[in-house]
Image: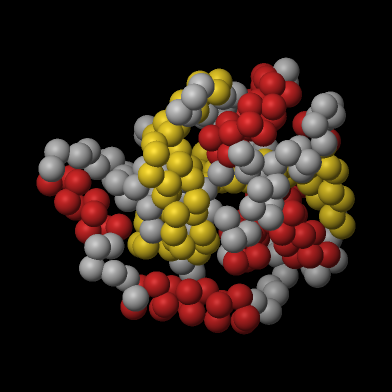
Amino acid sequence: MKLTIGHLYPDLLNLYGDRGNIMCIQKRLQWRGIEAEVIPYPSGSRIDFDSLDLILLGGGSDREQELVCRYLKQVASEFKRWVEQDGVLLAVCGGYQLLGNYYLTDKTKIEGLGILDIYTKWEPERLVSNIILDNPLFRYPVVGFENHGGRTYIGDYSPFGKVRYGHGNTGTSGYEGVIYKNVIATYLHGPLLPKNPEVCDTLLARALKKKYGEEVALQPLSDELEHMANQAITDRFQKNQPASSTSERRRRISKNGGRKRRQK
């Protein structure tokens, strides 16, 4: 078996070590005897979506996002078709924002790809924190680090997780990221996948199922160290959560007339 992974614009979108996600995907395939081919698509490259089983779209600054958006606009219809046909995609931070309709910064409006019916608005106070999410798809909490000025409004999409600690999409909604079909879009850095092997294996299993037409049982790996690190992170930030926690701030904002997104 073999998976082909497309790394889109690594020369522009690698602000938070997204190559770590690529390395994690490669290793977790190779350790199971599955061939992993990584194809980097630097700026200006023509992307052959039909040859790819899994795509990583990483994060970058506003300037890099504008450049990337110009390239991707030329293939937006192909990209959307690939997603709608259950292509497996991980989009992180700036990549997450680009999937939406637009990102309104303090200086300009960056038109997005319109693959997801979401939008992002910049606010001057950055949301910077370690973050812990709960998602019933995973046995362990999803952990990472967030650092974003944009607030992303996801409408009726299912979130990547419910915020146990941290800020999430807007700082007040109580949710983080988006899951749509085989797309995971999130603000979580870390990098995300080495810290959360279950998330990585979910992407791999979905990519293998799409390619080979049936469920592929992934050989279990020894993730003892990763699980110990996960436990240490969740224990540390839950125990040391300040009185002015993000959840308490959300409650105060809600009491003062702020709107909380309806939980599905």
Q: Is residue 208 visible?
A: yes
The one of 184 and 209 positioned closer to us in this rendering:
184
Residue at horizontal 48%, vertical 74%? 233
Q: Residue drawn at (38%, 44%), measured in percent from left and top?
A: 125
Where is 19 relative to 238, above or below? above
Q: Is residue 261 left or right of residue 211?
A: left
Q: Where is residue 237 in the image (x, y as percent from the top left)?
A: 39, 72
Q: Please report the residue visible at 24 percent of the width from the left and 54 percent of the height from the top.
A: 249
Name the residue rendered at 52%, 61% in the picture.
144
- In the rendered image, residue 76, in percent from the top left (x then y), is placed at 67, 21
Quarter location, residue 62: top right
The answer to which image quadrant residue 129 occupies is bottom left
- Which image quarter: residue 43? top right
| Colouring style | secondary structure
Image quarter in which the N terminus is found = bottom right
Quarter of the image with the C terminus in it: top left
> Left or right: where does residue 37 sit relative to residue 97?
right
Say whether residue 138 is visible. no
How many marks are shown on the rendered structure?
Answer: 0
- Give percent across and percent down for residue 232: 49, 79
In the rendering, at what x and y percent does residue 140 appear?
A: 49, 69
Name the foreground residue: 136 vs 258.
258
> Which residue is nearer to you in this view: 108 or 18?
108
